[in-house]
Image (cartoon, rainbow, N blue to C red):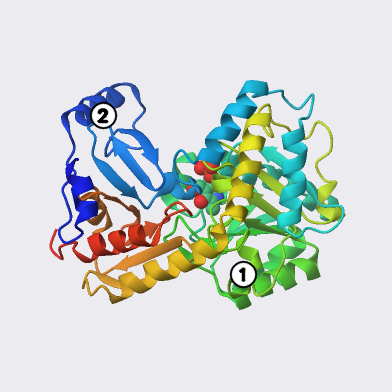
Amino acid sequence: MNKADQHCANVAEPAETVEGPRSRQWADRYDHVHMQVFGRPGRVMDHGQGAWIWDIDGNRYLDMLAGIAVNALGYAHPAWNRALAQQAGKMAHISNFFASRPQIELAERLLELAQAPDGSRVFFCNSGTEANEAAIKLARLHGTRMGGNPGRILALTHSFHGRSMGSLSLTWKPAIREPFQPLVPGMGFLPSGDPEALEEAFSGEEASDQPVAAVILELIQGEAGVLPLEPDYVQKVRELCSRHGALMILDEVQTGMGRTGHWFAFQDQSLSGGACPDVLTFAKGVAGGFPMGGMITFGSGPSGLLTPGTHGSTFGGNPLGSALALTTLETIQREGLLERAEQMGKRLRDGIAACGNPLFTSVRGRGLLDAVQLRSPCAGKVAAWCLDHGLIVNPVAPDALRLAPPLIIQADQIDLAVDILSKVPTRL
Ligand code: PLP
């Protein structure tokens, strides 16, 4: 039994899981051959089971990151593994010259889960960035149809929509956008949560030259530190988009597929105020760890905008990813993981709020997409301390930790995470 295993048996003192020699050696090899966009890996990982993962030195960690809010079913879930073997034994990839049963069933299931009206359609790709890029192209065609020019696509401050040229042009963080000037034209930002600026964008002088074709938003801004929008503001976006014929695009890449305790965050009144999107993008958790993304267009209006030849994807909707997504969604349903996300999220937030660590000033989120606000910008150091004590948390902002574990996480694992967090020293 390694030190982290012993810790599970006795939660009194967080056990140490320091970087071992094999991890160090492989991290050096990583460094030697990878571009420096992510920095040196914290540990080199080997395998996982449920919400646990092990590094190549045998240290065990409780995973509150889940591959950045992806691994809904945790690691090596038997249903997921079975679906993988079954579909891989039949056919992994076929391209969009053909279709497969899993792809068709998955599109039907997603429309059902999104309660999308007749005429709604699905487009499949492989990531959140690609999903948003598809939505951007669709919005430009919509703008052209509305006013003879592509119009403007507006995102909110603190947004994150991806790192391709279109999606990064709508991503707020300067480090992501600024090196790539000039950005895609016709893109802009609205101050998040400000209804007057929203009115002005639709009715001001600029709107007569270049009308708003679309507004894209995340109901919880995950990469900015898990910041939920106010439902009144979301309703206002909906109302103005409808009044001016613009598309409301919800980026549910991080919030979708059960993470917030609902299939989609817009189905949570406390986030959306009941507003439904025209277009919704998804990715991350949909296939439980296999790369997949896509876009749902609601109703027949936006569904007809992308016509043959205007967009595509070699791997989008491939049978393997589709079968894994079907299994992931089926398992979320069968194991009651939406309810579990709500219950475990509440247990986590309540536990942290009551743990008495003076480093933490507040905790927020929905379901299992949560964040702890820190008294000072020490998130990197706190995450490093947690890693050394068998807990993976994500320093999503200089002063905030994101907690987004697998949806299958158990109550005693939540308690263990709270216990370790309660022991983070105030001076690091
Ligand atoms: N949109 C949101 C809201 C995200 O959180 C992310 C990734 O974190 C993306 C888009 C980009 O997704 P991907 O990394 O799969 O391209």
For this rendering, which residue is in front, 204 or 219? Answer: 219
Residue 352 quadrant: bottom left
Three-letter residue code for mark 1 = Asp
Measured Cα–Cα span from mark 2 to mark 1 = 42 Å
Q: Is residue 127 above or below residue 28?
A: below
| Residue wearing tag 1 | 268
Report whether residue 178 is seen: yes
Q: Position of residue 277 (x, y in %)?
A: 71, 61
The residue depicted at 45 percent of the width and 53 percent of the height is: 173
Quadrant for the C terminus in the image: bottom left
Residue 351 quadrant: bottom left
Q: Is residue 69 above or below residue 11?
A: above
Q: Is residue 218 left or right of residue 30?
A: right
The residue depicted at 54 percent of the width and 45 percent of the height is: 284
Label 2 or label 1, whichever comes before in sequence order? 2
Q: Is residue 330 above or below residue 367?
A: above
Q: Secondary structure at mark 2?
A: helix
Three-letter residue code for mark 2 = Ala
For this rendering, which residue is in front, 128 or 151? Answer: 128
Mark 1 within 8 Å of ligand 1, using the beta carbon: no
For this rendering, which residue is in front, 174 or 328? Answer: 328
Q: Is residue 118 left or right of residue 328?
A: right
Q: Is residue 201 above or below residue 321?
A: below
| Residue wearing tag 2 | 27
Q: Position of residue 37 (x, y in %)?
A: 37, 35
Q: Are marks 2 and 1 in contact (CB under 8 Å)?
A: no
Report whether residue 388 is seen: no
Q: Secondary structure at mark 1?
A: loop
Q: Position of residue 115 (x, y in %)?
A: 76, 60
Q: Is residue 286 left or right of residue 296?
A: left
User: What is the tally of numbered marks visible in this picture?
Assistant: 2
Quadrant for the N terminus in the image: top left
